Image: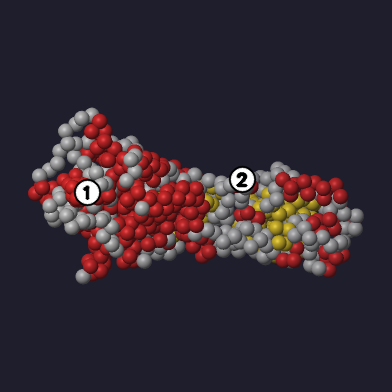
Amino acid sequence: MIRAFFIWFLLATPLLAAPLTRAALEPMIVAPYALGAPVNDKGVWTLLNSGGGEAGYVFETGPLAPLPGFSGQPIDMLVMLDREGRFIDVRLVSQNEPIFVSGLGEAPFRAFLEQYRGHAISEPLVVGTPYGSGGAASDNVYLDGVTKATASVRIAHESILAATLAVAREKMQGISAGPPPRPDPAQNQELDWKDLLDQGLVTRLVVSEGQLDVAFAGTRWAGDGTGGDPDTPFIDLYAIDLGPPAIARAVLAPGTLAEVQRFTARAPDDELYLLIEAGRHGLVSEDFVRNTAPDRISATQDGLPLALRDADILPDLAKDVPQHLDDATRMIVRLDRRLGFDPTREWQLSLQAVRLHGQFQPEVGETHFTVALRTPERFFLRPEAPKPLSPFGEALRNRAVDLVALAGFLAVLIAALLAQSRLAGLRAFTPVRLSILAFVIGFIGFWGQGQLSVVTILAVIRGVTTGGLEVLLYDPFGLLVWAAAILGFLLWGRGFFCGWLCPFGALQEFAHHLGRLLHLPQVEPPASLARALLWTGPAALIALIAVAIAAPEHAETVAEVEPFKTAITVHFDRPWPYVLWAGGWLAVSMVWFKGFCRSLCPLGAAMRVGGLIRLRRWIPRRAECGTPCQLCRVRCRYGAIAKTGEIRYSECFQCLDCVKIHDDPGTCVPLVLAARRERRVK
């Protein structure tokens, strides 16, 4: 029956909306780009440049990588990716993360997404800060997270990467997310020009004037050739990879070799190629500006354009290179391996041939001649791609210090509570307890953001029914608090969390002590009303679930019945109605001890299950407890002791007041009476 209800609850909540329509997408595309045609039914579209050419892709993360957030629904973002694999823009489409819906607002989330602009999918993007002393030398690109919302932005980051890699694998196969190959310095054998030719390390493209005429045949530029010998080379291109040191040393003069070495020291990710053109083509036009992209040369790999640039090095050739090549056009170009270029896989170098037709404002005709290049694998080292940390691993690394401190605190606290009689018997028990609660407020609450919430419980319910419990892994700090609360359920019931680990509960206890210092009157509802108020928490929990089913768009608003987000997560930095609600309950606690915990708290209502699954009755009782002694019941500020002396563990907050009374021979009535009888006998 319960499982059927949960399945109904899941199906009744809205699923991720369908991909955006063209009408909704077009206003989101930034100039000078425009929306092209749809690629598939998963929200992937082509991106057009100002000239109408294909410039990249636009897609939503929700349909491609529906990783559930803390609301149980994916965060949907729009990604604009150019053909080189760089992020043009990342925009928020929709999200239901509690921290952003009515806590911090969406502004910091949108600012986080702006950091992707200009970065490439080939870069190892990580949410967090450099770790340890070696962080500055890391290959990682660190994106600043959002304080108090690290788990949510990490979910968004993983969604962006997963969706982008899915598009890259399908549409941009030349882009690699792993480390690029690098020239192997150990491959340092002696080579000369003949060796380069014999081993196929020199790629040559020869196009004669006759072949050029054939290429323009049938066009208006057919008669605009030189009319010379058709066997004369128009293009006589030699292309040589200068990345491997042995090849560079075999083809370059010592001075140029030294200049190339200095260049690669400054730009270790650039692969340099020597181009020698002994024909009439000449590689570039007379208007070419050095250190820019050559205007007559282009390159592609896997159908994607490669960013080809002049390295601004005027090369001199080695002595054994044929003399006629000294008079040829020579230039060194560079390709960036970080952008996915792999010299060990085939790529294409294309030379543009141009003819002009007419005397005044001549019409330009063009054709292209392409040659395939590939450098043998033996000249390169291919670092093993580091296995990316799982989202849980990343979160563990970024919060390692906090987790160690939390684990240490929990270990000490559990040990102290296992020795509850010694703890309760301390003369300074109240200051010790308040010190612990202050640590809970400051470290677990304000700093660690470990305030558990009923929203998390709803997310867990969704996860149990859909297998999406990995949402908890994005917040290991909160997960450790949950683990401690569950362990506390087994040992003591709900009291361990509600009495010792809940930051807002601790705030209420401090409010109570402040009320005592101010000599405010202490109010305790009549027994009948107090028992009735115990049902308001379960009623609030049921109402929250009902709203989530019937009107899910209002679920986050109704969840504001919990003042935790206002008081703990955003430190009261919210509009006045939320501050009034949270502050009002603290004010109530000054006169009515922990009023919210004992009445309206939906999380507390869920936590009452802990009182049912505990493994033992940990509060000691005597036969006289309840009959006739009522001291513990009278002094219990939670009303968790029945007139019979029985402990109602579902309402017990483990304050240890009754344990202190039970073990104190000067306070416990049965012990006092027994001592009197013993003195009379003597």
Please identify the residue farthest to the top as the structure is shown.
518
Which residue is identified by label 2? 133
Residue hosting label 1: 682
Q: Is mark 1 on a helix, strand or loop?
A: loop
Closest to the observer, 666 or 452: 666
Q: Distance between the residues labelled 2 and 1?
A: 73 Å
Residue depicted at 72% across the width and 66% down the height: 377
Extreme front residue here? Answer: 682
Residue 221, compared with residue 598, is above or below; it is below
Question: In this rendering, would 408 be left or right of 582?
Answer: right
Q: Are marks 2 and 1 in contact (CB under 8 Å)?
A: no
Q: Earlier in the sequence, mark 2 or mark 1?
A: 2
Please name whichever residue, 618 or 247, is drawn nearer the observer in this view of the structure: 618
Residue 194 in the figure: left or right of residue 129: right
Which residue: 58% across, 51% down? 140
Is residue 100 visible from the viewing direction of this image? no
Residue at image coords 22%, 56%: 621
